[in-house]
């Protein structure tokens, strides 16, 4: 298995609970990683047998255009789109940061992280160890 990642995707979007956030927008940074078997793609040098990270970038761009009150909703839409399009993806990790959220103080970012599939295995193992 291989992890393919896009790190530091900077996109402006009109997301947030407060009306001024949806009017003026905020700057966001996304990190996206996917688990995928790239053995056949590597052997044959064939982009069609792996996950094209340009497509993942485009999915992020498209979903960022659809305004959401919650960054949790936005992050889940991106994950769902990736998993729905690439059948060979065995897990997604997405971290979405809203830079300088309007909280009345100095905060660098508010963030959510979603992990699915194989990215959940370390968490599941940790839970089992804690329960033992």
Image: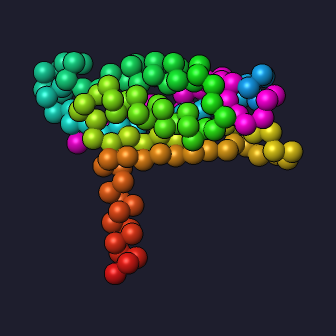
| Residue 5 visible within the image | no
Residue 8 is left or right of residue 16, and the answer is left
Q: How many marks?
A: 0
> In the image, which residues are magenta?
1-20
Queried whether the magenta region covers residue 119, the answer comes back as no
Q: Residue at x 23, y 42 (%)?
A: 1
Residue 43 is left or right of residue 131, and the answer is left
| Residue 63 visible within the image | yes
Q: Residue at x 19, y 23 (%)?
A: 49
Q: Residue at x 59, y 19 (%)?
A: 65
Q: Position of residue 80 (x, y in %)?
A: 41, 33
Out of 124 and 38, give the one closest to the viewer: 124
Place residue 128 in its image quadrant.
Answer: bottom left
Q: Residue at x 34, y 33 (%)?
A: 83
Q: Position of residue 121 (x, y in %)?
A: 32, 57
- Residue extending farthest bottom: 132
Place residue 9 in its image quadrant.
Answer: top right
Out of 124 and 42, give the one closest to the viewer: 124
Queried whether the magenta region covers residue 12, the answer comes back as yes
Query: Which color scheme is applied?
Result: rainbow
* Magenta part, dominant SS: strand
Q: Position of residue 115 (x, y in %)?
A: 42, 47
- Quarter that holds the C terminus: bottom left
Q: Position of residue 56 (x, y in %)?
A: 41, 24
- Residue extending farthest right: 104
């Amino acid at each position: 298995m291989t992890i393919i990642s896009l790190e530091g995707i900077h996109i402006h979007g009109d997301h947030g609970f407060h009306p001024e956030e949806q009017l003026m927008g905020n700057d966001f940074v996304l990190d996206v990683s996917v688990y995928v078997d790239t053995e056949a793609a590597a052997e044959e040098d064939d982009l069609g047998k792996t996950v094209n990270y340009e497509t993942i970038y485009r999915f992020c761009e498209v979903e960022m255009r659809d305004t959401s009150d919650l960054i949790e909703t936005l992050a889940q839409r991106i994950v769902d789109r990736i998993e729905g399009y690439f059948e060979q993806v065995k897990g997604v990790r997405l971290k979405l940061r809203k830079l300088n959220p309007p909280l009345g103080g100095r905060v660098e970012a508010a963030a959510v992280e979603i992990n699915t599939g194989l990215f959940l295995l370390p968490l599941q193992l940790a839970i089992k160890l804690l329960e033992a």
